[in-house]
Amino acid sequence: MKKGLYAADDEAVEKRADKVRSYLAEPSEGLVGSDKSDIVVVTHGVFMKFLTGDQDIDLPKAGFRTFVIEKNERNDCVLIPA
């Protein structure tokens, strides 16, 4: 059984999602003003619930959804449905 950051409990998954959102911030800022504007993230549907903060998101197998990366009032990265 995995422990720490890679454990299966909600707290660890939320920490991983925070880490991924922070990781996405730098390349997304680098795309501002360029002719390239997309970052593709491939992940599991359940992880998307944590990554987006939307527990009701329901993606079909091989489904996709488009989001915009923004910063909230605490300067944390958030994914906003486009």
Image (spheres, rainbow, N blue to C red):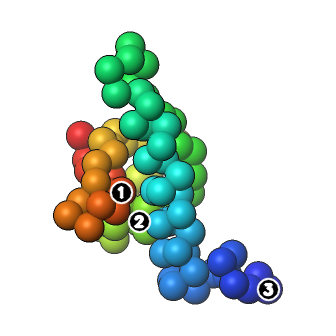
| Residue corresponding to mark 1 | 77
- Residue 2 image-quadrant placement: bottom right
Which amino acid lies under the numbered mark 1 shown in the image of this protein? Cys
Task: Identify the image quadrant of the N terminus.
Answer: bottom right
Query: Mark 1 to mark 2: distance in Å?
Result: 15 Å
Can residue 14 be seen by looking at this rendering? yes
Task: Identify the image quadrant of the C terminus.
Answer: top left
How many residues crowd around disc 2 within 10 Å: few (fewer than 14), some, or many (20 or more)?
some
| Residue corresponding to mark 3 | 1
**Residue 12 against residue 39 in the figure, above or below:** below
Which amino acid lies under the numbered mark 2 shown in the image of this protein? Lys
Query: Mark 2 to mark 3: distance in Å?
Result: 22 Å
| Residue corresponding to mark 2 | 49
Q: Residue furthest right?
A: 1
At which x and y percent is residue 43? 57, 52
Which residue is more in the foreground, 25 or 20?
A: 25
Mark 1 vs 2, N-terminal side: 2
- Please state which of the two labelled residues, at mark 1 or mark 2, is closer to the viewer: 1
Q: At 51% from the left edge and 85% from the top edge, which residue is drawn?
A: 11
